[in-house]
Image (tube, coloured by chain):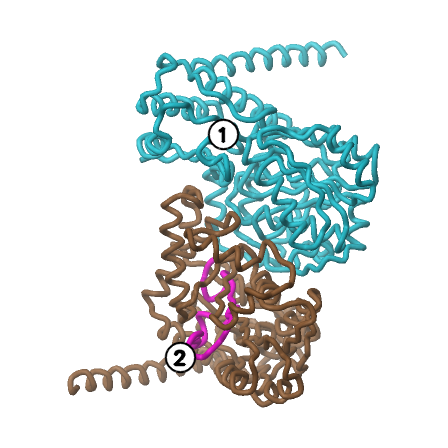
Chain colours: A brown, B cyan
Amino acid sequence: MKKRLFTPGPTPVPENVALAMAQPIIHHRNPEFIEIFSRVNENLKYLFQTKRDVFTLTSSGTGAMEAAVVNLLSPGDKAIFVNGGKFGERWGEICKAYGVNAVEIKIEWGRAVAPEEIESELKKNPDTKAVFLTHSETSTGVFTDVKEIAKVVRESSDAVVVVDGITSVGAHEMYMDDWGLDVVITGSQKGLMIPPGLSFIAVSEKAWKMVEESKLPKFYFSLKKAKKALESGDTPWTPAIALIVALDVALKMIREEGLENIWKRHEKLSLAVREGCKALGLKLFGYPPSHAVTAVYFPDGIDKKEFQKVLKYKYGITVAGGQEHLKDKIFRISHLGYYDEIDIVGVISALEMALMDSGFDKFNQGDGVKAVQKVFAGFEEKLVQKDNNDEMLSCCH
Amino acid sequence: MKKRLFTPGPTPVPENVALAMAQPIIHHRNPEFIEIFSRVNENLKYLFQTKRDVFTLTSSGTGAMEAAVVNLLSPGDKAIFVNGGKFGERWGEICKAYGVNAVEIKIEWGRAVAPEEIESELKKNPDTKAVFLTHSETSTGVFTDVKEIAKVVRESSDAVVVVDGITSVGAHEMYMDDWGLDVVITGSQKGLMIPPGLSFIAVSEKAWKMVEESKLPKFYFSLKKAKKALESGDTPWTPAIALIVALDVALKMIREEGLENIWKRHEKLSLAVREGCKALGLKLFGYPPSHAVTAVYFPDGIDKKEFQKVLKYKYGITVAGGQEHLKDKIFRISHLGYYDEIDIVGVISALEMALMDSGFDKFNQGDGVKAVQKVFAGFEEKLVQKDNNDEMLSCCH
């Protein structure tokens, strides 16, 4: 059976990227590798929209989260984090593990924190050193407006803004430097379209001063060591070389498509998934929606296990279930990374058929796919209009 | 040009292992992956010769070293480490970064610590909680008798024995349980023949009690979390899936060849490299020699840079240079992992030609390869004798 992954990490790996990993291994202190790694670093800056170094760590995204905490803070420092999902909650867990005084903003899983809530917490805690945010909360499919929050934090405190961009980088508009995000992290098996095993972290000049003074213990994740090694084009420890070779290919694809186009593609595909689901009578979970992953309530009255089995074993589609207390409430369809319109037609079509197989009949055959195509048609029209405008602009100025 | 790596990590990746990574990515919570990971775990136990779990971490080997320190110890605990090379020294650096009271046994780089030296340091420091050792010191090519040392430690203290087996596991005889080694770690890009990005750690029952009580901060490298996740066949964070799929293939190759045969092969190839070098008038560095890597003094009177360039760009052979103060003194030829007799003939032959090209003429053409073949011939004879004995045994008993 042909298998298709619609999970928010790992995401599908393009064939040419996968084959790049199968090339003969090269040594990480060799000129060949140094050349690849230097190109990767430049392209990562483009991806993050930053002039600062983007450090590549050999770890999952959680490793980069830990790197952010242990490199910025000292024991007893105060930090604010938002628990609005499993990954926001994780910022707090890491802080606690390292003796950071972590102030929790607990919100209902499925909504985004408002800039005012951050502002009010900062007023109560003027000695806050860092605010930890989640741009796209993978567990709930909710998007947080980190641009607005960064503005509020800057205006009301000296705290740095740390953004988990694990499922937003390469999916959502993000200008690290222009928006004043101090630390941004991401992982490899997401928008970057390569297998898991690498994570990335960039640090603003302001936040780097905290790195210089941070007293939390660290060794493997030391960013000072990473910076020193990067000065000779290298990493402090042997990196996951094959993944970096794959990353080089993936980043070239990203540059070719162009970041704005990629953001637009994610916006379009996510809208199509939401419209497709709604047309099938499904209820969406969480708001506002991330462009990376769509969370959907299981419809009442169907056998959830059976439905997932049919989806997976009859139609070859793997989606993600819910996490923690959302385990039996929602499932999540990812459209992050290497997806196009036909992929979305495919997943919504499979959803239709699996729902019908499960006895759920609140729609007519084809309703989902029809809604999906409608979104695409509308989007194209808009693009054509925009192109015409651009042409007019370029001919008249 | 055909390129050949003779570096102690990364080591060459077999073609079928490399191609396994290029397969469509699978999700780490799927039954398909759980099945692979469970087989990997069983085969890792075989590799380590232990009944204990072997935890797979997504990091370089240094990450597993850090995991050993932060999971066993508490702030202010006393530990002994042996600085006889760059990697022995690293145990001390990690301990210091985490506030462990690290007692250094400093020995000349190029020799192994003697069991008596450990014994005497333990007498001076009866409150020592852990002794950190390096089985095969990659920076010097020196082998340490951890079996004897473990015996001494057990007899004279309650400390646990922690072994960096990064370039020894899969090269040197090692029976973790039988020898009473409490913690053994290794990396993926070594004897395991896959690219870098994974590390491994196994913990004895005695050492696990320390894990339960350890107070050093940790999150990503928490072995308690790893153990809990392993109970459902998983890892706490998204692992480097493609590397684990490759590892599954590599471990099958290891089981097919058999651990004792692999150890013997490494012994034979390393002896051949040493004899080949000696026949070329080269002086070996360090004693006793590791079976994973051979350190050789640069001969006097040749242009070292030119020699290495010729070796690399004329003959396609990459060896490793020296590290730290040994940088311009030695070079290192690795024979760890996926190598056979013909590979060794190749590297010694290239060494001969590159030395001749560099004007070094303390040997006759073919001397090196002749010495290599002699070792192989002798080894085969021994094996034939052994086989005959086995046959006699099996026919007569």
One can see residue A337 in this view? yes
- The answer to whether B347 is drawn above or below residue A290 in the figure is above
Residue holding disc 2: A373
Label 1 crowd bin: few (<14), some (14–19), many (20+), radius 10 Å: some
Mark 2 on the same chain as mark 1 = no
Foreground: A2 or A137? Answer: A137
Foreground: A333 or A53? Answer: A53
For the residues labelled 2 and 1, the Cα–Cα distance comes to: 55 Å
Image point (68%, 42%), residue name: B42
Image point (55%, 14%), residue name: B380
**Residue contact between numbered discs 2 and 1, judged by CB atoms under 8 Å:** no
Give the residues drawn in magenta, as a range.
A166-194
- The answer to whether B29 is drawn above or below residue A96 in the figure is above
Q: Where is residue B245 in the image (x, y as percent from the top left)?
A: 55, 48
Give the structural element (helix, strand or loop) at label 1: loop
Q: Which mark is residue B207?
A: none
Labels 2, 1: front one: 1
- The answer to whether B31 is drawn above or below residue A377 in the figure is above
Q: Mark 2 falls within which chain? A: A
Residue holding disc 1: B339
Q: Is residue B209 left or right of residue A34?
A: right
Magenta stretch: dominant secondary structure: loop
- The answer to whether B392 is drawn above or below residue B10 in the figure is above
Foreground: B90 or B48? Answer: B90
Q: Quadrant of residue B167?
A: top right
Foreground: A83 or B93? Answer: B93
* Residue B98 part of the magenta-drawn span: no
* Residue A170 part of the magenta-drawn span: yes
Label 2 crowd bin: few (<14), some (14–19), many (20+), radius 10 Å: some
